[in-house]
Amino acid sequence: MAKYPKDRGLQLTLAGQQADSGQTDAALTRVKSLLKGNAADREIWTALAQMYGRLHRYPEAEKAVAKAEALATKPDEK
């Protein structure tokens, strides 16, 4: 992380580990900080939906899925 702090994949991996180890607030904050308000956010919203699902926070998961779907441009992304 120190060498590649802007690597989204590494950030998402670390957030997943944080969530799995009980640091859910830190994990969600880390993932949400990656949102930039552009089409690339689809991946982030999808990751958030998965994380919320694992945490049994289904209303938040549904909202994240809806936001990811709104950014989908190809049928296979939906």
Image (tube, rainbow, N blue to C red):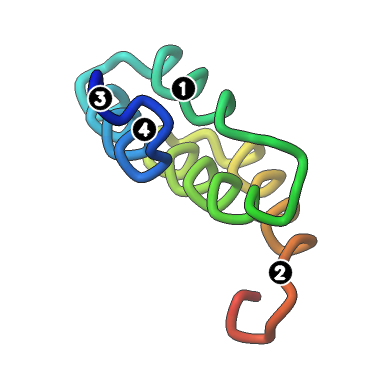
State the quadrant of the C terminus: bottom right
Residue occupying image coordinates x 60% and y 75%? 77
Distance CA(mark 4)–CA(mark 2):
22 Å
Distance CA(mark 3)–CA(mark 2):
29 Å
In this rendering, the answer to whether 44 lies above or below 74 is above
State the quadrant of the N terminus: top left
Which disc, if any, is residue 72?
2
- Residue 36: x, y in percent? 69, 36
Distance CA(mark 3)–CA(mark 1):
12 Å
Q: Nearer the viewer, mark 3 or mark 2?
A: 3
Q: Nearer the viewer, mark 3 or mark 1?
A: 3
Q: Which residue is mark 3?
A: 1
Q: Nearer the viewer, mark 4 or mark 3?
A: 3
Q: Callout 1, which amino acid? A: Arg
Q: Earlier in the sequence, mark 1 or mark 2?
A: 1
In this rendering, the answer to whether 78 lies above or below 24 is below
Q: Which residue is mark 1?
A: 30
